[in-house]
Image (cartoon, helix red, strand yellow):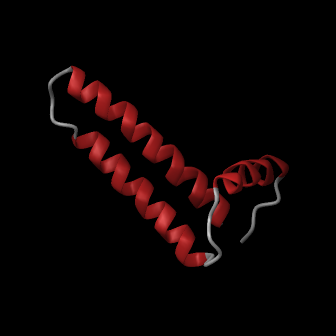
């Protein structure tokens, strides 16, 4: 479960950056970017709360591999 939360959180934060650039290019308030950023950070915090071992960048690749192999931790 923590693998899924890490991957979803990271994807949501990355999406929020894209949404921010698009909103600023259109001179609109970046509400969608803020929602995506908060949701992504909340998912990452939830994953950190569930698994207290520190996260590293290398964990993203390992989580992706476990997801593709079907070995997701519960």
Residue 61 position in % (x across, y down): 72, 48
Residue 63 position in % (x across, y down): 72, 54
In the rendered image, which quarter contains the N terminus?
bottom right
Question: Closest to the observer: 55 or 23?
Answer: 55
Residue shown at the point (19%, 21%) measured from the top left: 26
Left or right of residue 53, residue 27 in this image: left
In the rendered image, which quarter contains the C terminus?
bottom right
| Farthest residue, direction top | 26
Left or right of residue 6, residue 36 in this image: left
When the figure is inspected, residue 26 is found, relative to residue 38, above or below; the finding is above
Residue shown at the point (60%, 51%) measured from the top left: 7
Residue shown at the point (76%, 53%) measured from the top left: 62
Residue shown at the point (82%, 59%) measured from the top left: 71
Left or right of residue 15, residue 73 in this image: right
Report how many numbered discs are placed on residues in the image. Answer: 0
Left or right of residue 22, residue 24 in this image: left
Residue 20, quarter of picture: top left
When the figure is inspected, residue 27 is found, relative to residue 72, above or below; the finding is above
């Amino acid at each position: 479960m923590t693998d899924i939360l890490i991957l979803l959180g990271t994807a949501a934060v990355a999406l929020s950056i894209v949404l921010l650039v698009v909103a600023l290019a259109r001179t609109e308030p970046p509400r969608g970017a803020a929602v995506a950023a908060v949701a992504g950070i909340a998912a990452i915090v939830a994953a950190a709360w569930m698994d207290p071992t520190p996260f590293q960048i290398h964990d993203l690749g390992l989580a992706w591999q476990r997801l593709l192999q079907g070995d997701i931790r519960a």
